């Protein structure tokens, strides 16, 4: 699959699903009160991720909520791997997500959308 078809597939997922924010920016994780979300965090309704829930999304401050990166994670606490879509995130917001994930026992790698 080419980069264009990868990003087009993500765009279709985002366009055809409602974004549900269940963990607003600056809120604490429901089980770990010291984990504070740096951005709005939620999922795409009607989609399925490897954990059985919806595909996770981080929502940045850009009013155009298009996918500009994905983060691949390895969660050492849950022993799973996931892809999380970043929508409308600036570089500093992408870094805030990476810092949050790494501080919470997750290995991660960012794939940025190029022009």
Image (cartoon, grey):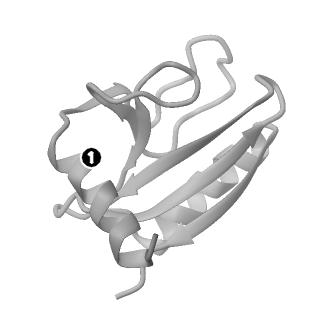
Pinpoint residue 44: horizontal percent, then vertical percent: 31, 34
Query: In the figure, 26 relative to 109: above or below?
Result: above
- Looking at the rendered structure, the secondary structure element under dot 1 is helix
Q: Is residue 79 among the parts visible in the rendering?
A: yes
Residue depicted at 22% across the width and 57% down the height: 65
Pinpoint residue 101: horizontal percent, then vertical percent: 68, 45
- Camera-nearest residue between 44 and 30: 44
* Residue of label 1: 13
- Camera-nearest residue between 20 and 115: 115
What is the residue that sits farthest to the front in this orientation?
Answer: 1
Instruction: Answer left or right for 84 relative to 101.
Output: left
Query: In the figure, 62 relative to 29: above or below?
Result: below
Residue depicted at 84% across the width and 32% down the height: 76
- Camera-nearest residue between 11 and 100: 11
Q: Quadrant of residue 115?
A: bottom left
Query: In the figure, 17 relative to 113: above or below?
Result: above
Pinpoint residue 35: horizontal percent, then vertical percent: 65, 29
Q: Quadrant of residue 67?
A: bottom left
Instruction: Answer left or right for 62 relative to 38.
Output: left
Q: Is residue 61 among the parts visible in the rendering?
A: no
Residue depicted at 68% across the width and 54% down the height: 99
Instruction: Answer left or right for 50 relative to 22.
Output: right
Numbered marks: total: 1
| Disc 1 residue crowd, few under 14, some 14–19, many 20+, Cα 10 Å | some
What is the residue that sits farthest to the bottom in this orientation?
Answer: 115
């Amino acid at each position: 699959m080419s980069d264009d078809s990868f990003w087009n597939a993500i765009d279709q997922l985002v366009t055809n699903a409602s974004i549900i924010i269940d963990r607003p920016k600056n809120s604490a994780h429901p089980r770990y009160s010291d984990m504070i979300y740096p951005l709005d965090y939620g999922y795409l309704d009607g989609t399925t991720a490897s954990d059985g829930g919806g595909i996770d999304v981080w929502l940045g401050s850009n009013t155009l909520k298009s996918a500009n990166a994905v983060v691949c994670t390895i969660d050492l606490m849950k022993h799973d791997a996931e892809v999380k879509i970043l929508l409308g995130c600036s570089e500093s917001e992408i870094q805030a997500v990476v810092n949050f994930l790494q501080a919470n026992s997750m290995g991660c790698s960012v794939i940025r959308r190029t022009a």
